[in-house]
Image: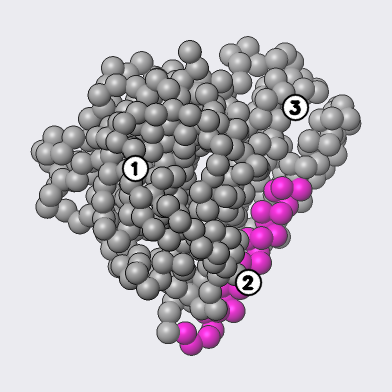
Amino acid sequence: MKTSRRTFLRGLGGAALSLPWMESLAAAPPAAGIARRMAHFYVPIGVVRRGFFPGESDDVIPKGNLGNVMKSLGKQNPNFEARALDELTPTMQPLEPFKDRINLITGMDRVFQNGTDVHAQCASCYLSSAEPYSIEQSAWPLDRTLDHLVADRIGANTPFPTLEFSCNTHRDNKESIYFDNISWYGTGHLAPSIRDPRQMYRRLFSTRENERYRDVTDLVLEDARSMRRDLGASDSEKFEEYLDSIRSIETQMDRLEAMRSELSEVDFDEPPEAYLPRGEFIRLMGDLMVVALQTGLTNVATFMVGPERWDTPYMFDGLFDKPRSHHGMSHNQTKMINDLLEVDRFHMEQYAYLLEKMAAIEEADGSSLLDNTLFTYGSGLGDGSTHQYNDLPIIVAGSGGGTFTTGRHINMPEGTPLANLWLTQARSLGVPMERFADSTGEIGAVKVS
């Protein structure tokens, strides 16, 4: 049995399972090479700067799970500097196993356009970075976002040119769409994110509404058994791992749905969704994103960890004994500094979890999914308490198929537009772009010479 890189096993009830590349099933190695991907992991409300940024602290004190927590505030270097990423700050410590596969990029700025809410603009315009007052038909400097521009180049032959994930479990639409979406087809034209894992699962695997045939892995098992006979030992193991990952996603969805049903029957001060374990939900949505990238269902994805400003509480696994509002804590940073540092670390742990998943997935040439992706962690605010748009927290993992160097801390000169990074990423992924938004040039220090 010889077939293309993306194969669909189809079973009763209309379920389809897309497969990763396997040598045993390919008629020949991919002629166009390994697909390059782009993904963005967006964290709302910025970070506690003294825990995230090197150089913003002089002294440390022991505290809780973070080990060393920053005490006194230093300053960022206003000049260009590129050096090895030798030590990680407390917030970045979960990335220690991937230190040589990431770049910390500091000194990136955006310009705030007066007249709109600071949180709405920092989220909705994060991947747009249009020059202030350049978009006449909108109160926001919001244009077609980077993910769609890149997808025009690298997503044209995938079932989904882009996929938009959101981990906002709440249904109390307190704020407008500008607080809960970072992906836009163009000014005023939202690319709506999917906030429910079951809905995303059905979108990816075309599962019909039929309780009898609920699990994709059950539906395609007979085809899978037949296909397994054509696989070599290595591919057979890879195939089993892939089926196990899909089954794990199904099991986790069932567990969270049962939990949500039970919580809906209890009288809480907060919405029942507030009590869903936050880390499990983020990782479940992340698993779906990784599967979609792995199997070629998409090459471009955006992943929003939470909405800006909603004040809706979450149960951060293992951190607090009741749901807490990230936004509420950010405006009381003096008293809640240690709690906020824990939340920042918590978000970084979820990012590290996805890096580990992507690094373990082998591509046709022996490289990993992470090697062939530019997977960016970032926020539209540099600090949630001060609402500053300068010195944004940005980490880029992976090398985009060998186009980025890694393992470096690159500090850009004061005033460098964030759009310079987006321009660099777009060009590295093959987009012939002269300029992006308010960019002034590429970040040459990240590119392979």
Q: Residues within 10 Å of mark 3 (few under 14, many from 20)?
A: many
Mark 2 touches mark 3? (CB < 8 Å): no
Left or right side of 190 for 13: right
Residue 79 visible from this viewpoint: yes
Q: Amino acid at mark 1?
A: Gln
Identify the secondary structure beneath mark 2.
helix
| Image mark for residue 76 | 1
- Label whose residue precedes the other's in the sequence (2 or 3): 3
Residue 320 in the magenta stretch? The answer is no
Left or right side of 332 for 247: right
Kindly report the distance in space between the C-alpha atoms of the residues bearing marks 1 and 2. 47 Å
Where, by quadrant of the figure, is residue 336 drawn? bottom left
Residue situated furthest front in the rendering: 59
Q: How many marks?
A: 3
Q: Residues within 10 Å of mark 2 (few under 14, many from 20)?
A: few
Mark 1 touches mark 2? (CB < 8 Å): no
Q: Return the residue at label 2.
A: 258
Percent from the top left, x then y, of residue 165? Answer: 47, 49
* Most common SS among magenta residues: helix
Q: Amino acid at mark 3?
A: Met
Residue 289 visible from this viewpoint: no
Camera-side mark, 1 or 2: 1
**Camera-side residue: 321 or 242?**
321
Q: Which residues are magenta?
A: 244-268
Kindly report the distance in space between the C-alpha atoms of the residues bearing marks 1 and 3. 47 Å
Coloration of the structure image: one colour
**Camera-side residue: 48 or 228?**
48
Left or right side of 43 for 368: right
Percent from the top left, x then y, of residue 311? Answer: 35, 69
Q: Return the residue at label 3.
A: 22
